[in-house]
Structures are given as C-alpha cells and as structure tokens.
Image (cartoon, rainbow, N blue to C red):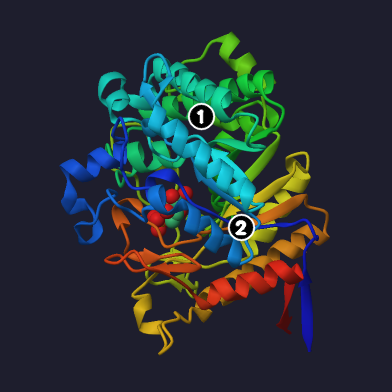
C-alpha cells in the first residue's frame, strides 16, 4: 500500500546556505572569526581546507541560483556577512563592492522567481570585534550589530521580504564558551555564555524593532531546536530534561516568541549568582519586539539523564546539571555522529502549535552530512545518494503529521543546496543536492536533487506503508 505525503501548493521547497560557507573570502574588507581561526590554526580544519574559495558562490551565483531553480527550489536562505558588507565597523559605512555583489544576488533571485530569506549573522562576527571588545560579551558590539543591520535595511530592506537576525545563536556560547569546539575554543565559561545569550537576544530584539520601523516585510530568527528527551520517566531525569530544554532551547525561543526568558533559568542563574546584566529598558525592548516567523534547524535530538557523577569544575556551567545519555539502539549517522530521529520534527511542530502561539514557522535546516560520497557516483557521473532521499522522506513524513494536526509550518529548507564548507569539518561531510568537485569547482546534481524537483512539482511524494 502506498500513502501520499502532501503539502500546500504554496509550500516553500528550498535549502539554506550561509555567506561564510559558500562565497569564499574574495574582496572582503574584514576577516570573520572563522577566517581568522583558519588563518591562525589550520590544523583544526579537516584536510587543512579553509574558507578562501569555499564554493565560490561569490563569482558563480548566477549559475548556482539557476541550478538551484532547476532542482525545484522555490526559495533559499543565505546570509549577508557583516565582515563583507561593512567597511567601517564603528559607523556601519558599507563597502561598495559588497553592496554591488549583494544587489546582484538579490536581482538574480528575483529573475529566477526564488524567494530569498536573508540572514544577518551565521557565527561570523568580525574578528576585530572579538579581539577588541570580547565579541558578544559586549553591549557595544550589540550596538554595532544594530548599525550593520541598519545599513543592510537601508540598502536592501525593501528588496527582500524575509529577514532573519541570527542563525543558531545558541551555538555561539555553546561551541565557543562551553564546549570549546569553535573559536575562541573556551570551555565551561558559563558566566560569559550566559551574558552572550542575553546580549544576542537583545541584539535580535533591537534589530527587529528597527526593521519594523524601516521596512514592510517580515523578520524572524533561526533557532536550532534540539528536543531534550529524558532517559526515563523518573522525576530526576524528567527535571533534568526540562532544565536542559529551558537552557538550550527556550533561552532563545521564549524571548523570540513571548518576549521573556524562561523563569526557571532566571531562578537558577540568580541562585548561582551568574545572572546576566540587564536593564529595565533592555528587557522592555526584548519584551516588545518579537519575531514575525520562526525558522527551525533540526538535525538530531539531545538525550539526557540526571547527573550520576559530579562535574569536576569550579566554574558555573549548565553541564553540572545533566549528562548526555547514550541511548542503546539509537540510529546514528556515523559520519557526523549525530542520532537520526525524525519523530522529533513532529514533537517540535506540536510544541510550537501548543506553546508558541502557533506562530508561522518553517524548517530552516535539516540534512545529512556524508563523507566519501564519490563512491556512490555511477558511470554517468551521478552521485546516487538514496540514503539522503530516505532521510528527507522520513523527516517530511513527520512534518506532514504535525501540519495535519494544525501546526502552522509553511516550508522546508534542507542543508544544503550545493556542498559547502563547514567550519572545522571543512568539506569532510557533504550535505548538498548538488555535488562539488573541490579541485575543478564542477557542480553535478545528485539523485536527491532530481528527487527534490519531483517533490516540489507534486507538492509531496508517496511512500510505501
Ligand atoms: C548547522 C549550521 O548547525 O549545521 C551550519 O547552521 C552547518 O552552518 C550545519 O554547516 C551542518 O553542521 P556541520 O557541523 O556538519 O557543518
């Protein structure tokens, strides 16, 4: 028996990418933190590959947008790089070459009838601002980000209908200050992480306020929502999962949608004397300037249990309240080490419907990174990535369940359209519908790209039950 998995006729079928991972560093007036990290510590990057050329979207955007259109994409997200657009980081004065480049990309999207979602920050703070002011720890940097956004809105605000302030803001404190896998590679710096969480929420609200004063489209935020499932239904495990959810998901989701931080987080931070510095005016800005729509990046769940051993650390850190739970029998993508659990998409959809005003939302990233895809290339040169098609089908099936139950989801973006550079993993794991030959920059549509075209044309697909 086969079953139809169907979506609305105006559903977005697209993919996400980001400036720093696609464009290459050509003509940039500043280095971002990732450019700097690579220049100074190449050994951290898979095969020593850096962002200089990346996927060369900077020069090839015309053919790339056309190719994306040819695989059925009607929308895509990318980002404006702060370190590219802004020549003078203190005043917000733009760089002329960058202005021309972004105008051209926007025009090309229009020509191809492609909905563009423009994001303003994808882990890519200009390195000077990290070195000079401590990056997102500083409220001066918050104000400089607002200047950057103002310049972007003045230049392109009414040419683009959908904007987002940040991509996965939690990754900045988590990867850079708690777990140490992104530059500045600090560990257990809970107090700094907490201030960064607050400052980014403030920056997002300030930019939303400005946008609504200056432009007529819609503005949102892209969050990596990682449902926290408890090991068991014991009160200890349940409380642990609630706290992990509050800290890692709701610390951005609640202010973005409801204008307020989770109470249990405020209580916990206050008890430990590590609450962020805030003012009543700032809290009012956060309260009054919430998002118009939400982007959700979903890759894998978080499985947690109550701590069994005390964390050996004198500093305050959220990790002292939980341990990762290695669930027996879980499905894993061995290349990335992430659990595959499509059902979480349904849970996210229902959570947004029930607890977040059923706000309009879309899946802004979902994908499967695989190493060594060359071995799946056939005699005609096509990569037969059936595993990726299966991955997407399973996730879309769960998304459709959520939509049928009333969740207000209007689109699906995968990560990503064309294989791209991925921070320190560089080009290890490939995610694209379109494969990239790193030496020749030749692009070839994979089997999943052909499949996506049929899905977009038919507004869905059928599965065997
Ligand atoms: C998301 C990011 O977290 O996941 C992307 O928004 C990233 O920038 C993607 O590339 C895939 O993760 P990774 O680490 O495998 O590149």
What is the distance, in whole Å, between disc 1 and disc 2 at their CAs?
Answer: 40 Å
Depth check, mark 1 against mark 2: the one in front is 2
Disc 2: CA contacts within 10 A as few (<14), some (14-19) or many (>=20): many
Label 1's element? helix
Say which label, 1 or 2, has the lower sequence index.
2
Figure quadrant of residue 106: top right
- Residue occupying image coordinates x 75% and y 67%: 459
Q: Nearer the viewer, residue 349 or 188?
A: 349
Q: Quadrant of the C terminus?
A: bottom right
Q: Which mark is residue 4?
A: none
In percent of width and height, residue 255 lies at 62, 29
Q: Is residue 181 left or right of residue 261?
A: left
User: 274 or 70: which is nearer to us?
Assistant: 70
Mark 1 touching mark 2, by CB under 8 A? no
Q: What residue is at 40 percent from the left and 43 percent from the top?
A: 319
Q: Quadrant of the N terminus?
A: bottom right
Please tell me in which quadrant of the rendered image residue 95 appears: top left
Tell me residue 75's x, y (percent). 63, 53
Query: Please, is residue 147 above or below residue 110 in the view?
Result: above
Where's residue 331, x and y in %? 49, 73
Determine which residue is flagged by label 1. 268
Q: Is label 2 in a helix, a strand or a loop?
A: strand
Q: Which mark is residue 14?
A: 2
Q: Is 308 on the left or on the right of 106, as rendered?
A: left
């Amino acid at each position: 028996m086969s079953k139809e998995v169907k979506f609305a006729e105006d559903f977005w079928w697209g993919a996400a990418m980001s400036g720093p991972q696609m464009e290459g560093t050509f003509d940039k007036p500043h280095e971002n933190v990732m450019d700097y990290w690579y220049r100074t510590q190449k050994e951290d990057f898979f095969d020593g590959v850096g962002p200089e050329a990346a996927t060369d979207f900077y020069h090839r955007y015309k053919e790339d947008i056309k190719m994306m259109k040819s695989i059925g994409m009607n929308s895509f997200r990318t980002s404006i790089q702060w370190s590219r657009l802004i020549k003078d980081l203190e005043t917000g004065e733009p760089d002329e070459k960058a202005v021309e480049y972004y105008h051209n990309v926007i025009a090309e999207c229009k020509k191809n009838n492609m909905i563009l979602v423009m994001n303003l920050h994808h882990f890519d703070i200009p390195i000077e601002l990290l070195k000079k002011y401590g990056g997102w720890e500083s409220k001066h940097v918050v104000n400089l980000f607002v200047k950057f956004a103002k310049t972007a809105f003045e230049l392109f605000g009414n040419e683009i209908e959908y904007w987002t302030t940040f991509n996965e803001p939690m990754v900045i404190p988590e990867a850079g200050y708690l777990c140490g896998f992104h530059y500045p590679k600090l560990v257990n710096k809970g107090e700094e992480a907490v201030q960064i969480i607050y400052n980014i929420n403030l920056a997002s609200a300030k930019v939303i306020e400005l946008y609504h004063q200056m432009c007529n489209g819609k503005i949102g935020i892209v969050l990596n929502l990682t449902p926290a499932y408890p090991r068991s239904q014991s009160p200890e495990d349940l409380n642990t999962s609630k706290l992990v959810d509050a800290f890692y998901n709701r610390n951005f989701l609640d202010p973005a949608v409801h204008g307020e931080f989770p109470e249990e987080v405020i209580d916990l931070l206050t008890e430990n004397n590590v609450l962020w510095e805030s003012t009543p005016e700032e809290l009012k800005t956060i309260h009054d300037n919430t998002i118009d729509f939400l982007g959700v990046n979903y890759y894998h769940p978080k499985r947690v249990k109550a701590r069994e051993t005390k964390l050996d650390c004198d500093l305050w850190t959220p990790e002292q309240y939980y341990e990762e739970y290695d669930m027996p029998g879980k499905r894993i993508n061995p290349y990335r080490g992430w659990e595959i659990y499509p059902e979480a998409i349904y849970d996210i959809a229902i959570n947004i419907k029930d607890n977040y005003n059923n706000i309009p939302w879309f899946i802004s990233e979902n994908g499967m990174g695989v190493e060594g895809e060359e071995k799946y290339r056939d005699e005609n040169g096509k990569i037969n990535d059936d595993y990726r098609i299966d991955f997407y089908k399973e996730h879309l099936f769960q998304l459709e369940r959520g939509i049928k139950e009333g969740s207000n989801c209007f689109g699906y973006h995968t990560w990503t359209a064309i294989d791209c550079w991925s921070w320190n993993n560089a080009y290890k794991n490939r995610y694209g519908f379109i494969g990239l030959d790193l030496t020749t920059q030749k692009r070839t549509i994979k089997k999943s790209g052909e499949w996506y075209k049929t899905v977009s044309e038919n507004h869905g697909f059928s599965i065997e039950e």
